[in-house]
Amino acid sequence: MPSIQSGKVLVSGANGFVATWCVQTFLDAGFSVRGTVRNAIKGKHLKRFFASYGDKFELVVVPDITAPGAFDEAVQGVDAIAHTASPFHLAADDPADLSGPAVQGTIGILESARKYGQTVKRIVITSSAVAVTTPKDGPLDEYDWNNGAVQAVANKGADAGNFDKYCNSKVLAERGAWEFLDKHRTEVGWDIAVLNPPLILGPVIHDVSTPDQLNTSAKMMFNAFTTEGPTTHGGQWANVKDVGRAHLLTVMTDLPSYVPLSAVNKKEGRNVNRFIIGGQGFTWQDMLDAAPTQYKKGFPGSINTTMRPRDMDNSRSQEVLGMDYTSIHETVEETLADYERRGWIKPFAASA
């Protein structure tokens, strides 16, 4: 499908950590943005923050993304959609508390686009690297699916691990999107691309006044620099600004011809438009090591390559989308500067 170089983009859940950076990135590239929020109060910060863009930024209220027809009005008159709204937390008792909103919100916005999105040409869905994770050896890539989490939840239900419950929700939502497109391909004038970033870290521009209000991934980063705890744990990470830029590039890039999910075959080089974003393996000690000297803590230099989680293969994002990635040092320094501006943290020298 051809790229989109201008026009209006709908960003769902526009007040979220990632979504706010998506809004910023689209506006800076000259697009108009329509953001959705659950209520008018959640939109107040966005209106102030993006006031300089005038009528190029607008908000609509979508109280419940799981309600039938929730996005029917919001999708009308836009050229692209960035669907970021989906729950991310690790405290669900019932797996459906995560999978319900994730699946229903995703299928709901696609159904609204099918019915009323006559001008829509591309829909970018923010999935997660946890939908890709498998126990296989070597780097993970876009052909991988986390079937283990789905099976764990199917077998154990509410007794499944909290992380499995979250992974299950991301797999079901993403697979549901591809299956929806398989079923309705001849009815719609748009295609789908999915972004699969891992743990997203970096500075915040959404509405938070205290560290307790940070989302799950950003709070992990803050805790790493402000609390004592294990530093050898980790995973894979992505810079939040890179994730925002990935949404923009996915809209503005000519993508390969559509391939049904059932026809994906790595040996034949066929793939859905699915992109791992970021994905470098890290431990929290790596983040501490990357900080300026006055912030270092933990056990500097104690991590070796055998202790660090494996990288994910993000080569498709670089080759197809033209992505390049922010370094761990730049990410840490910019995030710490954000904390310092907010008065949340002080370097050792300043607090002596």
Image: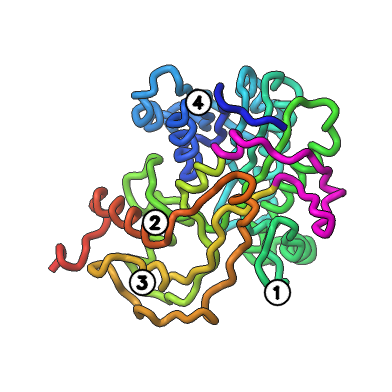
Picture disc at residue 31: 4
Are the residues at dot 3 and dot 4 in contact (C-beta closer than 8 Å)?
no
Q: Residue at x 32, y 65 (%)?
A: 291
For marks 2 and 1 on the same chain, the one whose residue lies earlier in the sequence: 1
**Crowdedness of circle 2 by 10 Å Cα count: few (<14), some, many (20+)?**
many
Per the model, the C-alpha gap separating discs 1 and 4 is 41 Å
SS under mark 2: helix
Dividing the picture into quadrants, the one containing residue 295 is bottom left
Name the residue tied to disc 3. 289
Mark 1, residue position = 137
Q: Would residue 126 be seen by someone viewing this image from the given angle?
A: yes
On the image, the x and y values in percent for residue 130 come to: 64, 59
Q: Is residue 165 above or below residue 27?
A: below
Helix, strand or loop under label 4:
loop
Left or right, residue 198 beside residue 28: right
- Residue drawn where x is 68% and y is 52% of the image: 169
**What's the CA distance linking mark 3 and mark 1?**
27 Å
Indicate left or right for 190 with 81 as reference. right
Q: Position of residue 158 (x, y in %)?
A: 69, 61
Q: Amino acid at mark 1?
A: Asp
The part of the chain drawn in magenta is 248-273
- The quadrant the C terminus occupies is bottom left
The amino acid type of the residue labelled 2 equals: Thr
Q: Are dots 3 and 2 in contact, CB under 8 Å?
A: no
Q: For the residues labelled 3 and 1, say whether their Cβ atoms are less than 8 Å apart.
A: no
On screen, residue 258 versus residue 292, left or right, reads right
